[in-house]
Image: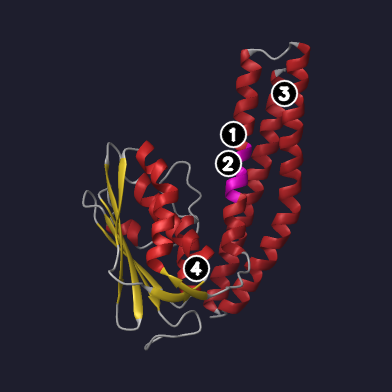
Amino acid sequence: MGAGVFWLMAAIFAGVYAALTALYVLLRRRAAENRRRSDQAHEQELLERVGAGLAHELKNPLGALNLNVQLLEEELEARGALGEASRARLATIKKEYRRLEDVLNDFLRYAGHRTLAPAEVDLNAVVGELITFVRPEFHRRNVALEGIFAEGPVKVKADEGLMKQALLNVLLNAMESISGGGTVTVSTRTLDGEAEIAVRDTGSGISKEDIEHVFEAYFSRKEDGTGLGLAITKRIIEDHNGSIKIDSAPGAGTFVTIILPAEGPGHRREGQ
């Protein structure tokens, strides 16, 4: 595989990434204009409309590009023309494809329309299932994952799938903040007409300046992060008329508190 082909594909990926960046800048500018007009409904409608167009305009071409890279790799392999340098270049292209796909999917999850399907769930069971699911990855990263559950059921009306997605984002952020071993603790409890999920980690912590921005779309200090995980989490929690708060300091770990009304998404707490 010649260097020319590699650089052509790299240029295509660079063009797609530039298009995503330009789209993001446009959305932020339009969103700022909408906020100045206090027109949040219009802002969300814009995000959903652009998100749908983005899916149509980019997902299919990206999929076709990935398929052709795979076919090219197979063809070169069959000809015996796939040397180490070509293999490394193809691996780089496929890695960048997966990264762009992650960025696109996260954007669609953030901007897309969500229809809640609330039902009575026990947060003890939801958190327990999620801990079981992610514990192998925590173990691989040398991070202990502990659960402290309320004695009785912690029942709320919520969309179970979306709640798991919101909490998963928090758990993964906690895990990734720890290097060299540490602990993440998840706890549940009932309050007066509300339920609480708390996540505490022994990670590196977050500066006061960064805490003010952690829920903003595309804000991230991670080199390979999309900056949408906590933004998605906040939207899901607020869709359930709940709240999420982060307390942290550099070197002191991070404490995330999620409060949900027991009555579900249709219930608004006093003061909302």
Bounds of the magenta segment: 97-103
What colouring style does the render use?
secondary structure
Could you tell me the amino acid type at mark 1? Answer: Lys
Mark 1 lies on residue: 95
Mark 3: amino acid: Glu
Residue 73, numbered label: 3
Distance, label 1 to label 2, CA atoms, is 6 Å
Q: Is residue 179 visible to the viewer in this orientation of the structure?
A: yes
In the picture of the structure, the residue carrying the numbered disc 4 is 236
Q: Amino acid at mark 2?
A: Arg
The amino acid type of the residue labelled 4 equals: Ile
**Residues at marks 1 and 2 touching, judged by CB atoms closer than 8 Å:** yes
Apparent side of residue 93 relative to residue 68 in the rendered image (left or right): left
Question: If you read the primary sequence from the N terminus, does the residue marked by circle 2 or circle 4 appear first?
Answer: 2
**Mark positioned earlier in the residue sequence (1 or 3):** 3
| Rendered image: mark on residue 99 | 2
Magenta stretch, main secondary structure, is: helix
